[in-house]
Amino acid sequence: MMSVTSFHFFFMFACSLLIYYTVLQKFQWQALLLFSVYFFGMSSGWKMGIIFLANAAVTGYLAVHMSRFKEAGNEKAAKCMLVSGVFFNAAVLAVLKYSHFFIYNWNILLRFFHKEPLLETLQLDAPIGISFYTLISIGYLADVYWGLAEAEKNPFKMALLLGYYPHMTSGPVSRAGELSGQLFGARHRFNYETAASGVQRMLWGVFKKLVISERAAILVNVIYADQESYRGLYVWTAAFLFMLQLYTDFSGCMDIILGASECYGIKLPENFRTPFFQKVYRNTGRDGILHLEHG
C-alpha cells in the first residue's frame, strides 16, 4: 500500500510533475489519468484497477442515458437511471468493504440456531478510497440528474473525473462540475509561486503526520496500555494527545493531497480545516431545496 508519506509516493509525485509540465504538457489530463491508475494499482492491487475502470464505465453509461432521458422529458426513465446508479455504487461498496462483516455475523446467527453456515467469510481487500469514490460517483449522478453538471461521454475522462488520485485517499468529495472545468478546461502551465505554495503545504502536512501525530501516538499507547500505573492527570493528558493525534494525522494527510493537487494547478475544496469549530446553517433557497452552509 502506497502511503502519502512514503518515499514511493513522493518519487511518483516528482516524476509526475516533470512529465505533466514537459513531456506530456499537451496531454495533461491523460497524464493525470495514468498517474491515478498507477497510484490506485500500487495502493490497492492491480486487480482492483479493473473494478475502478468498470465502475467508472457503468456510472458514465448511466449518466449519459439519464441525461438523454431528461432532455427527452422522460422523467421516470431518468429517475430509474439515477436509482440504478446509486444502487450499483452502494452494492460495490458493500461487497468490497462490508461483505466480511455481514457474512461473519450471519454465520454467528446460524450457529446460534444450530445451523451450519452457508457461506464462508470473504477476505476482500477494499481498494483505497473506495468510500470516497462511491460518494463522488453518487454525487456525480445526482448533479447530472439535477442539471448541475453535464454527462461526460468520454469514458477515459469519466474515469479521471471519479478517480483523480489526490482525492482518493481521504477526500475531499469534489463536485463534478467544478473539477471537470479544471481537469479538462484548459492547459496548465508551470507557475513557480503555485508550485512552491503546494510543496510548502505538503511539507507542513508531513510534519503534522510524522512529527506531531506519530510522537503523540507513542505517549497515548503507553498510557492506555497500562491504566493501572497511569491515572488522573495522565489519563486526561492521553485523552488530549489522542485528540491531537487524530486531528494532525487527518489534517496532515489533507495538506499533502491538497498541496499535491495545487502543484498540478488544480484547486480542490478545503476539507478538515477547523472541524472542532464548524457550524452548519440550514438555508432554504428560492428553489425550495435545503442547502447546508458551513461557517
Image: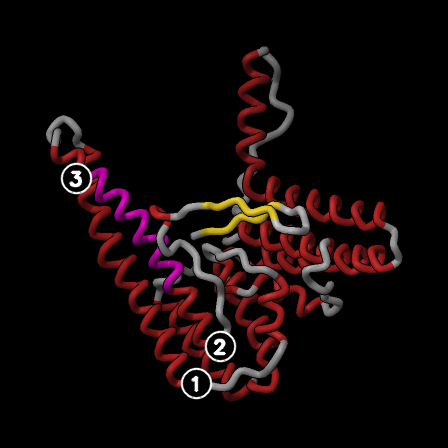
From the viewer's perspective, tell me whether residue 199 is left or right of residue 180: left
Name which residue type carries label 3.
Thr
* Residue picked out by circle 3: 237
Q: Residue at x 35, y 79 (%)?
A: 196
Q: Quadrant of the N terminus?
A: bottom left
Q: Residue at x 60, y 22 (%)?
A: 117
From the viewer's perspective, tell me whether residue 290 is left or right of residue 217: right
Measured along the vertical axis of the image, is residue 178 above or below residue 209? below
Viewer-proximal residue among 101 and 59 = 59
Main SS of the magenta segment? helix
* Image quadrant assignment for residue 223: top left
From the viewer's perspective, tell me whether residue 11 is left or right of residue 40: left
* Residue picked out by circle 1: 191
User: Disc count in the image?
Assistant: 3
* Image quadrant assignment for residue 96: top right
From the viewer's perspective, tell me whether residue 181 is left or right of residue 74: left
Q: Position of residue 52 (x, y in %)?
A: 62, 57
Name which residue type carries label 2.
Gly
- Mark earlier in primary sequence (1, 3): 1
Which contiguous range is marked in magenta?
238-255
Q: Residue at x 65, y 47 (%)?
A: 289
CA distance for labels 2 and 3: 41 Å
Whether label 1 touches label 2, CB < 8 Å: yes
Measured along the vertical axis of the image, is residue 255 above or below residue 30? above
* Residue picked out by circle 2: 265
Name which residue type carries label 1.
Asn
Measured along the vertical axis of the image, is residue 15 above or below residue 205? below
Looking at the picture, the colour scheme in use is secondary structure
